[in-house]
Amino acid sequence: MSILEVVNVSREVTWLPWAVQYFFLIGLSVACFVMSLPGFVLDRPAQRGFARLALIGALACALVAPVALLADLHQPGRFWRFYAHPNLGSWMAWGAFFIPAYVGGLLVYAWAALKPDFYAAGAQGGADPLSRLQRTIAFGPRPVPRLTKLLGAWTLAFALLILLYTGMETMVVRARPLWNTPFLPLQFAATAFSGAAGLVLLIGRLSGETDEAADGLAARWMMVGLVTTIVLGLAWFAIGALGLDATHAQALASVADHRAWQVTAIWAAAATVLPLALLWARPAGWSWIAGLLGLHAAWMFRWTVLIGGQTVPKTGAGLYVYELPLGHDGLLGIAGTLGLWAFCFVVLTIVVPPVRAADRGTTLAHA
């Protein structure tokens, strides 16, 4: 009789919470930008107030997301290697080109879309420093609708490429069946939109620009994102449970018998069903809770996939144990990212003028 012993070595996670923060923030930014397009590019005055809130969310998240990505490289100076020695067969390498193109396009698109508002606010304010800054940013009173549409198209192209690459760079890891599914890029996108809608709801309250029409649009975007997430999740589970695909069946089998993942499944179901029930009932104060739940669902999905997925061994049985450290690679890093986002949000809400009274009246008239 021969005895074969298999020794499994516990490994540290390679993608740290910084990666979760990056995937979370860049997804929110892209989704917020897409939600701003009807108000600015399609020139729908009824959606202008909503579009402004969404654009602020897109800008704040886009400015912070690359910082989290650089931190996740463990040595931020490594970023230049993506350009000095590009590996064009890697989705991660392509992302190094997509991100600057998207962030740069977003900044110029925001300037073009808000140019008349900057000039109007600066002209009304007089000689105070903020008004002078707004007039300088406006660079004249003339609106640039054609440029806004052109920049919107440019930024949209790279926004879609970012949604594609962030899903694909995880999906292509065949050694992890939990990641190796075509559902993953779609689920990243769906949860990004539900989280972005929640962010818009919160921005409206934090900036004091509550708007019933904007809240209604955010609620519809969130409902679409949540329903899509549920449908994709049920499809993934059905394919794995019925054994229609070997990879999906292996992925489901790797987590189905573990109590931690069973609790996670219940948690994920509650994180999507509860916001839907809240959006349908809309009790008093629903927007605060719905906004937080939408953000929670988007962040929780990325944490479960990226961090939880790394706790499933590629070989062997059981799960690796992950404990969130308190330092910069853990809780402190998460708190620091939130603090940096809050700083960018405050600066943006000070500099970017509020929606004009004429637009607000049009918005309310269409509510």
Image (spheres, rainbow, N blue to C red):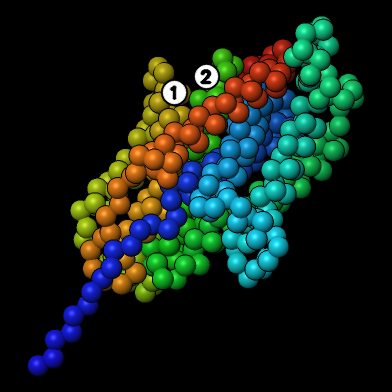
Q: Which residue is under mark 2?
A: 205
Q: Residues within 10 Å of mark 1 (few under 14, many from 20)?
A: some
Residue 185 lies left or right of residue 104; in this view the side is left
Q: Amino acid at mark 2?
A: Arg
* Image coordinates for residue 54, horizontal then vertical, percent: 62, 31
| 132 versus 7 height, above or below | above
**Relative to residue 85, is residue 95 depicted above or below?**
above
For mark 2, give the secondary structure: helix
- Mark 1–mark 2 Cα distance, whole angstroms, equals 8 Å
Residue occupying image coordinates x 66% and y 50%: 99
Give x and y (percent) for residue 26.
57, 44
> Residue placed at 54% from the left, 36% from the top?
196
In the image, is 126 to the left or to the right of 234? right
Tell me which residue sits at (28%, 68%) in the image: 9
| Quarter the C terminus occupies | top right
**Image quadrant assignment for residue 35:** top right
Which numbered marker is on residue 107?
Answer: none
To which quarter of the image does residue 305 belong? bottom left
View extreme (left): residue: 1
In the image, residue 185 sits, relative to residue 270, either above or below, namely below
Asked if the residue under mark 2 is in contact with the one under mark 1, i.e. CB atoms within 8 Å, the reply is yes
Number of on-image labels? 2
- Which residue is label 1 attached to? 288
Q: Is residue 238 visible?
A: no
